[in-house]
């Protein structure tokens, strides 16, 4: 830009009122956010250059729309863009996606996120679970070496249910009506190896069959499984025929042979529970989404960025596997 052109623009800006300057600054920020999102989305198109309908790789450019390149499949003739088939497809207000992802990176509540992004709280709720739909299943696919497993429990929550409540509603999470473990507690199985690869499962029941069904696909055959002295975990390990090292925590045993312990998975449980408290009770139907969200936080070492949230929401980080061996 020439010097005289720059001076002319600066002179015009000086004529604007404070309100007009604020409006202009907001508009420029929105444009930059849309451009940043479009750039990230288009990078997905390079990675996923196949038709989302038939999987054919003979595709060609087919114009643009809403700032995104459209494509046409040479096989089924379907047209699409890089958002087609993702949870963010047809989602509006693209200029607010990065800002909302930033709120999620900070672990803000639905209401605070809505206020910060100037959207309705119901929109904020829908966006949260659109963004978390894929991270829900993006867990480690293979645990190797010494792996640890433990069950943790979350109070059943029917938050958001308007009709057909089987009990009186609780306020902001509330407390169970029964002491100890009961059908009011939802079991979650947490599994980690020493490399930090993590998988978790919301179980219908914490018994041998359900635990074994969760562990069997992700544990390497030569893995060594460390658990507490719980009967269900031990029975599942025996049924799978893998090496099992139970740690009798009740007897004061913490480490066996200097390497076998469950301190890694117990520490993860503690961090997970502490992080979840900010939400004052998570609806059980969405519990798996929050587990996926926490895995994203752990993978980033508490330095989760807005772009990382968007990449996960678009399926550009398909597995939260730190290392495959």
Image (cartoon, rainbow, N blue to C red):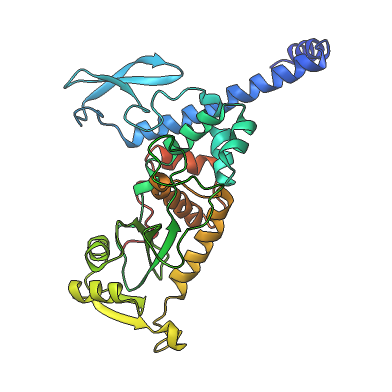
The total of numbered circles placed on residues is 0
Q: Quadrant of residue 188?
A: bottom left
Can you give x and y, in whole percent of width and height, for residue 77 in the image?
A: 20, 17
Tell me if residue 153 comes above or below residue 48 in the rendering: below
- Residue 302 shows in this picture: no
170 and 240: which one is in front? 170
- Residue 19 lies, in percent from the top left, at 78, 16
Q: Is residue 304 left or right of residue 228?
A: right
Q: Is 252 located above or below residue 128 in the figure?
A: below
| Quarter occupied by residue 200 | bottom left
Please state if 277 lies on the left or on the right of 139 as rendered: right
Frontmost residue, 306 versus 278: 278
Residue at (38%, 33%) from the top-left corner? 87
Q: Residue at x 36, y 31 (%)?
A: 45
Whether residue 122 is situated above or below residue 265 in the rendered picture = above
Residue drawn 40% across the image and 57% down it:
184
Q: Quadrant of residue 89?
A: top left
* Residue nearer the viewer, 133 or 285: 285
Q: Quadrant of the N terminus?
A: top right
Say whether residue 226 is visible.
yes
Outermost left residue: 75
Quarter in which the C terminus is drawn = bottom left
Q: Nearer the viewer, residue 28 or 61?
A: 28
Q: Is residue 47 above or below residue 3?
A: below
Q: Position of residue 311 (x, y in %)?
A: 44, 40
* x 46%, y 84%: residue: 254
- Residue 28 horizontal side relative to residue 43, left or right: right
Point out residue 193 in the picture as x, y percentages from the top left corner.
38, 69
């Amino acid at each position: 830009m020439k010097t005289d052109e720059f001076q002319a623009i600066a002179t015009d800006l000086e004529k604007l009122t404070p309100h007009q300057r604020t409006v202009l600054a907001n508009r420029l920020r929105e444009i930059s956010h849309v451009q940043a999102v479009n750039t990230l989305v288009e990078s997905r198109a390079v990675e996923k250059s196949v038709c989302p309908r038939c999987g054919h790789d003979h595709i060609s450019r087919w114009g643009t729309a809403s700032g995104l390149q459209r494509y046409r499949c040479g096989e089924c003739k379907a047209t699409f863009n890089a958002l087609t088939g993702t949870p963010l497809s047809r989602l509006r207000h693209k200029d607010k996606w990065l800002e909302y992802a930033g709120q999620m990176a900070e672990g803000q509540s639905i209401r605070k996120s809505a206020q910060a992004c100037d959207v309705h709280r119901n929109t904020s709720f829908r966006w949260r679970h659109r963004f978390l739909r894929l991270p829900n299943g993006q867990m480690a696919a293979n645990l190797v070496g010494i792996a640890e497993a433990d069950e943790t429990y979350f109070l059943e929550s029917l938050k958001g249910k308007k009709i057909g409540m089987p009990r009186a509603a609780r306020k902001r999470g509330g407390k169970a009506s029964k002491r100890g473990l009961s059908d009011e507690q939802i079991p979650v199985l947490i599994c980690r190896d020493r490399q930090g690869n993590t998988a978790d499962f919301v179980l219908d029941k914490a018994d041998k069959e359900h635990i074994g069904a969760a562990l069997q696909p992700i544990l390497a055959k030569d893995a060594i499984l460390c658990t507490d002295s719980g009967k269900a975990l031990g029975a599942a390990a025996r049924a799978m025929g893998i090496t099992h090292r139970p740690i009798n925590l009740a007897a004061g045993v913490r480490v066996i042979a200097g390497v076998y312990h469950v301190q890694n998975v117990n520490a993860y449980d503690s961090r997970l529970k502490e992080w979840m408290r900010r939400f004052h009770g998570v609806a059980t139907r969405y519990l798996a989404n929050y587990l996926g969200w926490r895995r994203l936080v752990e993978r980033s070492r508490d330095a989760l960025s807005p772009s990382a949230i968007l990449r996960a929401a678009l399926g550009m980080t398909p597995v939260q596997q730190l290392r495959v061996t």
